[in-house]
């Protein structure tokens, strides 16, 4: 019984980890189609170094977005980067990846 509960808990955590909540921000948010959002979400999900439970997407133009993924908790890391649509596919701009740690100063 105990092992069944543990397996269920681990499966639930893995399922939660794969589900990323997406928040569109900025005045150009209406420029992104549902398919664009899904492609961006999938591209981030496939990258273990950028994977997150929450993704913030800020459209910069019809084929470029700024993305933030990672934790919003103090002391933890989040990543910011841009993605570009080339043809019908969204790709991470590798040169734009930056990691940041949230620090509170008084």
Image (tube, rainbow, N blue to C red):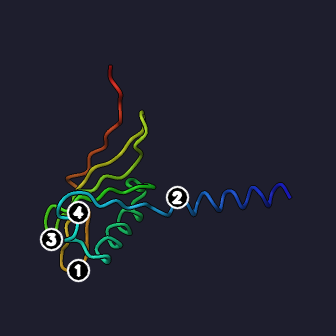
Q: Residue at x 17, y 60 (%)?
A: 27
Total number of numbered discs in the rendering: 4
Disc 3 element: loop
**Which quarter of the picture shows residue 21?**
bottom left
Distance in Å between CA atoms under marks 1 and 3 = 12 Å
Q: Nearer the viewer, mark 4 or mark 3?
A: 3
Whether the residues at callouts 1 and 3 have beta carbons within 8 Å, the answer is: no
Whether the residues at callouts 2 and 3 have beta carbons within 8 Å, the answer is: no
Q: Quadrant of the N terminus?
A: bottom right
Distance in Å between CA atoms under marks 2 and 4 = 22 Å
Disc 4 element: strand
* Identity of the residue furthest to the left in this view: 61
Reading the chain from its start, which is encountered first: label 2 or label 3? 2
Reading the chain from its start, which is encountered first: label 1 or label 4? 4
Residue 88 — which label?
A: 1
Residue tagged 2: 17
Q: Residue at x 80, y 57 (%)?
A: 3
Residue tagged 3: 62
Distance in Å between CA atoms under marks 1 and 2 = 27 Å
Whether the residues at callouts 1 and 4 have beta carbons within 8 Å, the answer is: no
Whether the residues at callouts 2 and 4 have beta carbons within 8 Å, the answer is: no
Question: How far across and how far down the image is residue 35, in percent?
Answer: 31, 78
Which residue is at the front of the view, 106 or 96?
Answer: 106
Distance in Å between CA atoms under marks 2 and 3 = 29 Å
Dot 1: within a 10 Å radius of its alpha carbon, few (fewer than 14), some, or many (20 or more) residues?
A: few
Distance in Å between CA atoms under marks 1 and 4 = 13 Å
Distance in Å between CA atoms under marks 4 and 3 = 11 Å
**Which quarter of the picture shows residue 9?**
bottom right
Which residue is at the front of the view, 32 or 67?
Answer: 32
Question: How far across and how far down the image is residue 17, in percent?
Answer: 52, 58
């Amino acid at each position: 019984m105990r092992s069944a509960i543990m397996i269920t808990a681990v499966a639930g955590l893995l399922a939660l980890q794969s589900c990323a909540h997406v928040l569109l921000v900025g005045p150009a948010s209406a420029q992104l189609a549902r398919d664009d959002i899904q492609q961006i979400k999938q591209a981030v999900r496939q990258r273990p170094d950028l994977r997150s439970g929450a993704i913030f997407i800020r459209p910069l133009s019809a084929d470029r977005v700024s993305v933030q993924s990672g934790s919003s908790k103090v002391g933890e890391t989040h990543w910011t980067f841009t993605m570009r649509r080339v043809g019908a596919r969204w790709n991470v701009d590798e040169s734009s990846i930056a990691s940041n740690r949230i620090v509170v100063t008084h």
